[in-house]
Structure formats: structure tokens, C-alpha cells
Image (tube, rainbow, N blue to C red):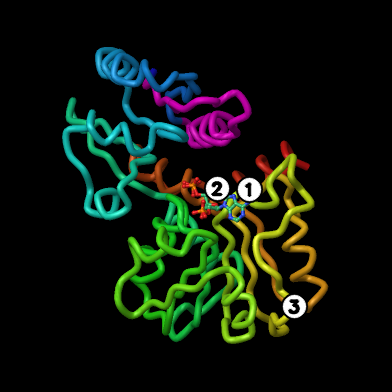
Amino acid sequence: MKLFALIGCPVHHSLSPLMHNDAFQSLGIHAHYHAFHVEPHMLKEAVQGLKALQCAGLNVTIPHKTAVMEYVDELDETAKQMGAVNTIVNENGKWIGYNTDGEGFVRALCEQMDVELSGARILLVGAGGAARGIYFSLLKHRVAAVDVCNRTVKKAEAFVVQQSSVYSLEEAEERVGEYDIIINTTSVGMYPHVDATPLSLRHVKKDTIVSDIIYNPLMTKWLQEAKEKGARVQNGVGMFVYQGALAFEKWTGIFPNTKRMEQLVIQQLG
Ligand code: ATR
């Protein structure tokens, strides 16, 4: 029996064990995925322990995504660029760190919303770790623009490349009508602060895609507003499922059934 693990703090609400164990079972793979609560000061010991146990693969979540980089043997280019690791693969004892968050978002966007990214004008709201991952993944596609707005403008300026514009939230609110896709990467609107919204959508165009990486609640107040304006909306379940599916593929070589994963997650959250 192969062991796969999630390390984070907290992890007790994580839906990853449910999703991965169901995929292992349905594919007949003899493996088990377990979530371990690891306090920040115990990260090194936890990693060493899992290495000693010959853990076959890991997911890493908040607050360890950056700190864990110190304990892997090799870093994939995307993880380096993002400054964060969410997936580790044990290749014959060598631990290799990857990041599937950004690509997970992009795959979910393309496949669930049937979007053509080439030529799209995109606005990212937020400039934290999630924003960075999504930003660099979007740039790999032939998008027309990925602009970033954030409460703290300097944080966005610190990672964007030349062709992107950076705005304050107030400036961006006036420009919302210029974009085909608008993505909230902040935690604003997440349970229990469900009445907050990250950015006014009063100027949003009909048929714009408005995507929120939050999945608790499934429908944030922001997405409700977007829907009322005639936008096409997507919640964060897709990103969660696809980042997991991409990790699963790195561990096993098999891309799992994302529809089944999504159903499980929604059932649990709904
Ligand atoms: P993550 O790594 O999950 O993206 P993070 O690095 O803490 O988390 O980033 C959180 C993002 O949410 C940031 O863009 C943050 O804005 P600041 O850079 O100005 O801190 C944004 N954010 C969090 N709370 C916010 C609030 N109440 N209003 C506006 N933006 C907020």
C-alpha cells in the first residue's frame, strides 16, 4: 500500500483525502491518502518523517507552501517562478516539488467554461500566492492582457511583467467593462465573511466570465452580483478539483475523472 499525504495547518476540513482516496479506489490503485496537521515549527521533522516512511507523494497547503521548498531535492520551473510548492513527487527517493495551483485554475477555466484564452483580456483581483500562480499560468497562453489589481498595489507591482498593467481596486472598478474574464484570487467573501465583495462589478459587461477561487460558499456574494449582471460565473470548485487531478497525474501517470471528483466535492459542500 502506497502512502500519499497532505500537510498543512489546519487540514481537518480538507476535501483532498475524500477526492484522492475515491480516485485511487475507482482506479484500483492500492494507495491511501491521509491529511496530517503539521504545525509550522514541526515542518522539517514532518517532512523527514514522511521521507523515512517512503511516502510516495505529497500535497502541501497553507502555511507550508513556501517553507517546504527548502526540504525538497529538486524544484520544477513553475514552482520556482511561483515561489510555492503544492505537490511533491517521490521519484526513487528524490523529492521533486511542483505547483499545480495555477495550471489547475487554467484547466478548470478552459474545460468548465469552454473559454478561448487566446486574445482574451483578463483582470486578476489580488496579489497573493494564489494570484501569482494563476498569473504565470495564464501568461503561458496567448492572452491579450493579464492585468492585476490589488488593495496593496505594490504587492502586484512586485511580480508582474512589463506588459501587464497594475491598478488599485478603485481604478480597476472603473475599467471592469474592458475585460473578458475577471478572476477573484483574494479571500474576500469567503465563509464566514460572506457579505464582503472584493471589487464592484457595476460596469461588468454581459457575458463576461467572472470566476472566484473561493468555494465556501459555493456562490459568493460577488458571483451572485456578477450573475445578476448577466455574466457567466464559475466558483472555486473547479480549481480545487483540477489542482488535485494534476497532482494525482504526477503521482500515478493517470489523469483521474474530474467530473466524479467535482461531484464528490459539491456533495460534501452543498
Ligand atoms: P493567498 O496566498 O491565499 O493568495 P495571501 O497571500 O494572504 O493569500 O493574499 C491574500 C490576497 O487577498 C491579497 O491580495 C490581499 O490584499 P493585500 O495584498 O492588500 O493584503 C487580499 N485581501 C485580503 N483581505 C482583503 C480585504 N479585506 N480587502 C481587499 N483585499 C484583501
In the figure, is residue 262 to the left or right of 162? Answer: right
Q: Amino acid at mark 1?
A: Glu
Which quadrant: the N terminus? top left
Q: Residue at x 63, y 48 (%)?
A: 262
Crowd band around label 2 with a 10 angstrom C-alpha radius: few (<14), some (14–19), many (20+): many
**What residue appears at the point 26 percent right and 19 percent down from the top-left corner?**
51
Packing grade of label 1 (10 A; few <14, some 14-19, many >=20) is: some
Secondary-structure class at tag 3: loop
- Coordinates of residue 179 in the picture (x, y in percent): 57, 82
Which stretch did the figure color magenta?
Answer: 2-28
Q: Are marks 1 and 2 in contact (CB under 8 Å)?
A: yes
Q: Is residue 126 above or below residue 32?
A: below
Going from N to C along the chain, the mark reached first, 1 or 3, is 3
Q: Identify the residue position indicated by label 1 in the image.
A: 262
| Residue 241: mark in rendering | 2
Distance of mark 1 from mark 2, alpha carbons?
A: 6 Å
| Residue visible at 52% across and 73% down in the picture | 123
Label 1: element kind = helix
Residue 18 falls within the magenta-colored stretch: yes
| Amino acid tagged 2 | Val
Q: Is mark 2 within 8 Å of ligand 1?
A: no
Residue 250 x %, y %: 33, 43
- According to the image, label 3 marks what residue? 202
